[in-house]
Image (cartoon, grey):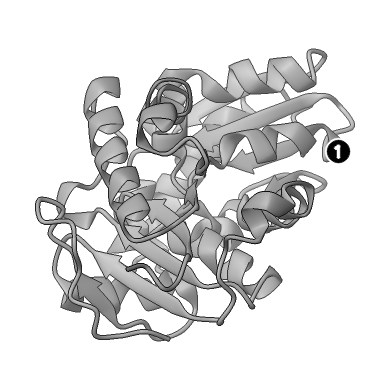
Amino acid sequence: MVTTQPIGIFDSGYGGLTVMKEIVKKLPRYDYIYLGDNARAPYGNRSFETVYRYTLQCVEWFFEQGCPLVILACNTASAKALRTIQQNDLEKLNPDNRVLGVIRPTTEIIGQFTKSRKIGVLATHGTVQSGSYLIEIEKFFPDIIVYQEACPMWVPIVENNEHMQPGADYFVQKHVHHIMANDREIDTLLLACTHYPLLRDKIQQFLPAGVTVVSQGEIVANSLEDYLKRHPELESRCSQHGNRLFNTTDSTEDFDNHASIFFGEAVRSNHVDLDNGIPVVDHIY
């Protein structure tokens, strides 16, 4: 029998930990369970069908753990799988549960950051290809012109802990200059990948003065707080013991070594076999 009902936070790998960090900071009283599907990462260059299938399997796993709410803290999963899961699968899996993403909370308020009404979106190839940010921003702010730039090397740079090294400068400068070359009036850059906040200082270094860099963690945390207030029937189902449980589908040693870079503190994880669906729970914070 499920005794806790944690909020689930999902990512294909480590990046979602930057979102979880802000959520825990904002809402520390709730229980959280994180799953990184590191064994099948990265999702960025995979097909829509593959990302959907992997994400759905992970959402099913979260529901089996008793989560009434799952946050897809992954832009690729949010772009390629969220809508289908919400529209086609949730009713069959558990109509009382909810699955949310990171794209809508960001696009709902991006207009607050730009005066010129011209922004750039830095993302993985998969997120750019999906066109999700173009579609969602158009819904909320049809007057904003959006330019996109895929930055395929940025995720491996961060995951190899090279993001603070001089070697990262070339790849950061290349994509920053490329997107800014689209329009000199771009005054806002959105980091539409949860890895990219770790490159924020370098990104800012190559930008003209006055360009605002927006990352998603704090935005998603604020949006979640508001969502829970507006849905008390769901909020009451989320257990509140301040526990945090970390899981990975790959090596726990590798996960723990990398996770602290993203989460900002030491992490000890459990291994999950998605075919069996049940983790060996050793480490609860």
Mark 1 residue crowding within 10 angstroms, few (<14) / some (14–19) / many (20+): few
Q: Which residue is mark 1?
A: 112
Q: Amino acid at mark 1?
A: Gln
Q: Is residue 22 left or right of residue 41?
A: right
Q: Is residue 29 above or below residue 127?
A: below
Q: Residue at x 17, y 47 (%)?
A: 40
The answer to whether residue 103 is left or right of residue 225 is left
> Does dot 1 land on a helix, a strand or a loop?
helix
**Residue 277 image position (x, y, % from top left):** 18, 56
Instruction: Name the image quarter holding the N terminus.
Output: bottom left
In the depicted view, which residue is nearer to us: 61 or 162?
A: 61
Q: Quick one: which residue is furthest to the front in this view?
A: 1
Q: Residue at x 69, y 22 (%)?
A: 137
- Is residue 285 rendered to the left or right of residue 191? left
Which residue corresponds to the image point at 33% horizontal and 61% vertical from the top-left?
Answer: 65
Counting from the top left corner in percent of width and height, residue 15 is at: 42, 57
- Residue 204 visible at all: no
Please provide percent x and percent y for residue 57.
Answer: 25, 41
Q: Position of residue 37 (x, y in %)?
A: 25, 53
State whether residue 242 is above or below residue 222: below
183 and 263: which is toward the camera = 263
Up/down of 265 relative to 274, above or below: below
Quadrant where the C terminus is found in the figure = bottom left
Residue sitting at x 82%, y 40%: 113
Number of dots carrying numbers: 1
Q: Is residue 152 visible?
A: yes
Left or right? Give the position of 74 relative to 1: right
